[in-house]
Amino acid sequence: MTARIGIVTVSDRASRGDYEDRGGPAIRQYLEEVLTSEWEAVPRVIPDEQQIVENTLVDLVDVEQCSIVITTGGTGPALRDITPEATEAVCQKMMPGFGELMRKVSLEKVPTAILSRQTAGIRGKALLLNLPGQPKAIAECLDAVFPAIPYCIDLLEGPFLTTNEDRIQAFRPRKK
Ligand SMILES: Nc1ncnc2c1ncn2[C@@H]1O[C@H](COP(=O)(O)OP(=O)(O)OP(=O)(O)O)[C@@H](O)[C@H]1O
Ligand SMILES: Nc1nc2c(c(=O)[nH]1)N[C@H]1C(S)=C(S)[C@@H](COP(=O)(O)O)O[C@H]1N2
């Protein structure tokens, strides 16, 4: 079963073409380096409009059948930053540990890490995960949480994910 992974850049400026989106490609590159099981990317670049973000997340899970959806951008305190609200609105349960851990490791890099409200949650059988907009934040955050993601997807009855163990060791506390 090929895993489908939604990659969503939430950025007014990238979606308008004011700058080239570097966030989506950075997530894709990270996954190419880390995942050894088969997967395919389902990319989107959208503005910071809550209804558009919600519709995109719902489409990626319910229609595109993504097992994981990773967003970048729109997690801060600015008026138009609404990615965490959109994520929470479409999830049936929240997974606060992801945001807590990502902020903890990010704080070792930048004092402004506390400005990110990044979160994660479950919709159906999919894990939705927010990352900050700074492209360099992507690997910093994913390195911290990725060891737990394959087992999370196991528990959601999704595809069996394997990783390049030199980079990320997937932790599975018990066989299903
Ligand atoms: N998708 C992206 N591609 C390239 N650089 C980005 C991207 N998103 C953010 N950045 C960089 O990170 C900095 C901080 O991002 P900021 O918080 O302003 O963006 P955002 O809220 O995610 O997106 P925007 O303000 O365009 O809606 C930006 O000034 C920009 O240099
Ligand atoms: N690892 C990491 N986390 C980070 C950052 C970063 O550079 N690296 N930037 C912070 C800053 S400056 C902001 S404002 C918030 C929110 O960013 P966003 O609105 O682009 O999502 O993420 C924070 N988290």
Image: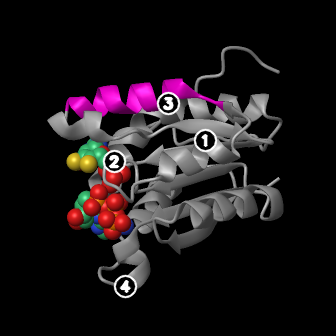
Which quadrant: the C terminus? top right
Q: Which residue is mark 2?
A: 76
**In terms of sequence position, does the residue under pointer 3 or pointer 2 come before the other?**
2
Q: Which residue is mark 1?
A: 88
**Residue 103 falls inside the magenta stretch:** yes
Where, by quadrant of the figure, is residue 153 drawn? Answer: top right
Q: Nearer the viewer, mark 4 or mark 1?
A: 1
Where, by quadrant of the figure, is residue 102 drawn? Answer: top left
Callout 1 amino acid: Glu
The answer to whether one can see residue 110 in this image is no
At 57% from the left and 71% from the top, the residue drawn is: 44
Callout 2 amino acid: Gly
At 38% from the left and 40% from the top, the residue drawn is: 141
**In terms of sequence position, does the residue under pointer 3 or pointer 1 come before the other?**
1
Q: Residues within 10 Å of mark 1 (few under 14, many from 20)?
A: some
Q: Residue furthest bottom?
A: 17
Q: Residues within 10 Å of mark 2 (few under 14, many from 20)?
A: many
The Cα–Cα distance between marks 3 and 1, rounded to whole angstroms, is 13 Å
**In terms of sequence position, does the residue under pointer 3 or pointer 4 come before the other?**
4
Q: Residues within 10 Å of mark 3 (few under 14, many from 20)?
A: many
Helix, strand or loop at mark 1 = helix
Callout 3 amino acid: Phe
The answer to whether one can see residue 5 in this image is yes
Q: Which mark is residue 17?
A: 4
**In terms of sequence position, does the residue under pointer 4 or pointer 1 come before the other?**
4
Considering the whole magenta stretch, tell me its main secondary structure.
Answer: helix
At 53% from the left and 46% from the top, the residue drawn is: 85
Range of residues picked out in magenta: 94-108
